[in-house]
Amino acid sequence: MISFKLLTHDAWGVVTAGEFSSLEQAQEVFRNICADPWYRSDGTVKGVELVRCNASNPPERLEWFAFS
């Protein structure tokens, strides 16, 4: 079964911000996080990525956004 995860990256490591069964749901939340004023101004969150996961393959990065 394929799932999609959102991962945030900061100075302490990687955190799962959400797991979704559809790519459309994951992309919508990904766009919302990228545009969120808190994430954009916080300074500790360095980036967010959208990955596709399944049991037989390693996670595959589909999208990446770096906060500057």
Image: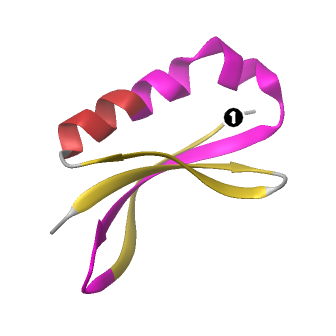
Residue farthest to the bottom, as pictured = 56
- Residue visible at 39% across and 53% down in the picture: 5
Quarter that holds the N terminus: bottom left
Q: Nearer the viewer, residue 49 or 19?
A: 19
47 in the magenta segment:
yes
Q: What's the magenta region?
A: 30-57
Q: Which residue is mark 1?
A: 67
Please name the colour scheme applied to the rendered image.
Answer: secondary structure
- In the displayed structure, does residue 11 sit left or right of residue 49? right
Q: How many residues crowd around disc 1 within 10 Å: few (fewer than 14), some, or many (20 or more)? A: some
User: In the rendering, at what x and y percent does residue 33 appear?
Assistant: 51, 27
User: What's the amino acid at mark 1?
Assistant: Phe
31 in the magenta segment:
yes
User: In the rendering, at what x and y percent does residue 30 appear?
Assistant: 42, 34
User: In the rendering, at what x and y percent does residue 35 appear?
Assistant: 53, 19
- In the displayed structure, does residue 9 sit left or right of residue 61? right
